[in-house]
Amino acid sequence: MSQFWKPTFTRSSIDVQILSYLQYAQVCARAVRNSLKEEARVVAIRRDEQGLKYAKWEAGKQGELKNTVGNRTTA
């Protein structure tokens, strides 16, 4: 009967089950953002968006600067 209450996890199975710190921080941040009032929530969600700007260089000159947000590319 004692085998049912004793921990039987190995080190590798514990590593798989535990969230990484970054995943944990993302879950906590999402919970905090969702608990805010509407005005503050909109600001926090907008701040959470990540973007990337890039430009193609040709012959030593920078081309048009483009923004990417998520998977969308906008000029």
Image (cartoon, rainbow, N blue to C red):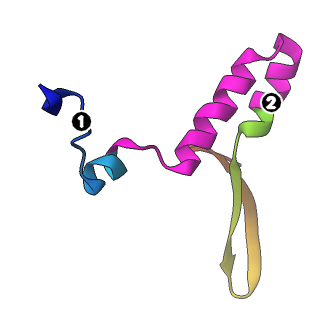
CA neighbours of label 1 inside 10 A, class few (<14), some (14 to 19), many (20+): few
Q: Residue at x 57, y 49 (%)?
A: 22
- With 12 as the anchor, is 51 left or right in this view? right
| Residue 19, x across and y down, in percent | 46, 43
> Can you say whether 53 is above or below 63 in the image?
above
Outermost left residue: 1
Residue labelled with disc 2: 44
Report the amino acid beneath label 1: Lys
Residue in front for this viewpoint, 75 or 44: 44
SS assignment for the magenta stretch, majority: helix
- In the rendered structure, which segment of residues is drawn in magenta? 17-45
Which mark identifies residue 26?
Answer: none
Q: Which comes sooner in the sequence, label 2 or label 1? A: 1
Task: Give the x, y percent position of residue 69.
Answer: 65, 44
Q: Amino acid at mark 2?
A: Ala
- Is residue 40 rendered magenta in the image? yes
The image shows residue 14 at horizontal and vertical percentages of: 33, 47
Taking the image as shown, residue 52 lies to the left or right of residue 17, namely: right
Alpha-carbon span between mark 2 and mark 1: 44 Å
Q: Residue furthest right?
A: 39
* Residue 1 image-quadrant placement: top left
User: In the rendering, which numbered label is found on residue 6?
Assistant: 1
Nearer to me, 12 or 59: 12
Quadrant position of residue 52: bottom right
Comparing marks 2 and 1, which lies closer to the viewer? 1
Name the outermost residue toward the front: 2
Marks 2,1: beta carbons within 8 A: no
* 40 lies left or right of 45: right
Please name the residue shown 25% across and 45% down the image. 9
Q: Nearer the viewer, residue 36 or 60?
A: 36
